[in-house]
Every structure is written in C-alpha cells, then in structure tokens.
Amino acid sequence: MSEVVPQMPPRVPKGGNAFTRWVGRTVLRLLGWRVTGNLPDEPRFIAIAAPHTSNWDWAVAMAALLALGIRINYMIKDSAFVWPLSLVLRATGGIPTNRAAPAGMVEDVAERLLDTPEIIMVITPEGTRRRVERWKTGFLRIAALAQLPVVQVSWHYPGKLIHLGPVAELSGDLDTDIAAIRAYYRQFTGRNPENQSP
C-alpha cells in the first residue's frame, strides 16, 4: 500500500509519536486523502493554507498533521475557545485572536515568532470560510518582520489532496506578492467552491 504522506525533513518541528502518526495515517486512508509535496528543511516558517471554504478543512488538516508528525500553531477567533472545544484547540496548537481588535496583532505575532527557535505558524489568508474579494496581507507583513519564509499549503477536494509547498517567492511589495499567491491557488478547489475567492 502506497504511503499517504511524505517523509518530513529533519529540521521541521516534530510532534506526536508513532501511535499518533499511525492514527493520522489511518484516518487519511479511511477518508481517501493523501499528502503530496514537502516542507522546507527549516525550523521556522509561516504556512498559509487555502482555499479555506469549510470547517472540514480543519479536520482533514489535523489528520494530516498527526500523520506527518509535525507540530504547528495557528490563529483562530477567540469566540471558538469555549469548553470543551477549547481543550482540543489548545492541544492542537490553536492561539486565540480577537478579530475585533486587530491593531498591533501583526507586530505582536512577529515579535513572538522572532523569539521562538522552532515554529510553524499556519494562517488562512482569506481570514474566513466565506467568499472574499481581498485576501488579508497580515501574513506577508508578519513574514517580513519575523524574517520567515512563506510556504504555500493547499486543500484540493476533487482529488482529496493536501499539497505542501512551494515556498512563495516574495518581492517585498504587498500588492504584487498577494496577487502572485492568489494566482497560484486558483489551480486548487475547496470543499465549497461557491465560497472560494476569485
């Protein structure tokens, strides 16, 4: 039986154990999903994940992370942190954020990342599961301030595929970079295409 996930490079932050990797791979096989591509051999980077159109994205991603044996953090609205869901969110790397008070959040996150020797920060650039005309550029500003590469991770529901990579080639111009990243993601289809950004 072919493997459902690639082998991770040695410097990527690791998490879990042999049992949790088996659980993740078993869930992916049962659901018919697989992971292709790879992550850079780096201990610190931002991973953007798109197209984000459904709550199922989180469930599939968690199975993939267990299967890969990697450790991540991700930002999620603070209103989701209600018991008992909050226990699961924190255990899987969730960090509550206040969307009603975004001022200073980019600088706060960047400072935290600068002081962390090993971290994969996962961000959904749409910022919501609903269709939006503009993607948020906060992840690009965080990457610049924290001196981190940006890895593009994709859900593709027609092929039941999560694709890791490539690293985005950034110019430093926010408009140019966000346009190039959005163009890359047009080849992938989310669970609810009607919610997918153009």
Image: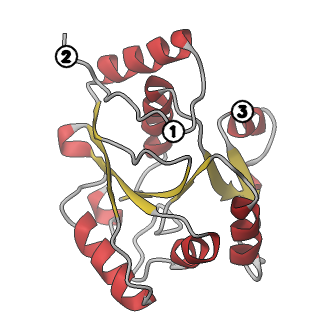
At x 35% / y 59%, what residue is drawn?
A: 51
- Say which element carries label 3: helix
Amino acid type of the residue tagged 2 in the rendering: Ser
In the depicted structure, whether residue 43 falls above or below residue 33: below
Decide: is 117 above or below 29: below
Q: CA distance from mark 1 to mark 2?
A: 25 Å
Q: Nearer the viewer, residue 98 or 47?
A: 47
- Alpha carbon separation for disc pair 2 and 3: 30 Å
Of badges 2 and 3, nearer the viewer stands: 2
Q: Measured along the vertical axis of the image, is residue 81 above or below residue 87?
A: below
Q: Which residue is mark 2?
A: 2
> x%, y% of residue 194?
29, 64
Task: Say whether residue 92 is left or right of residue 157.
Answer: right
Q: Secondary structure at mark 2?
A: loop
Question: Mark 1 belongs to which amino acid?
Answer: Arg
The answer to whether 63 appears left or right of 159 in the picture is right
Q: Quadrant of residue 101?
A: bottom right
Residues packed near mark 1 inside 10 Å, few (<14), some (14 to 19) or many (20 plus) = few
Mark toward the start of the polypeptide (2 vs 3)? 2
Q: Are marks 1 and 2 in contact (CB under 8 Å)?
A: no
Q: Earlier in the sequence, mark 1 or mark 2?
A: 2
**Spot occupied by residue 48 in the image (x, y as percentages of width and height):** 45, 59
> Mark 3 — residue?
91
The N terminus - image quarter: top left
Is there a contact, CB below 8 Å, between mark 2 and mark 3?
A: no
Q: Dot 3, crowdedness within 10 Å: few (<14), some or many (≥20)?
A: few
Residue at image x 44%, y 86%? 172
Residue that badge 1 annotates? 11
Residue in view at x 53 percent, y 56 percent: 45
Q: Position of residue 191 (x, y in %)?
A: 31, 49
Label 1 SS: loop
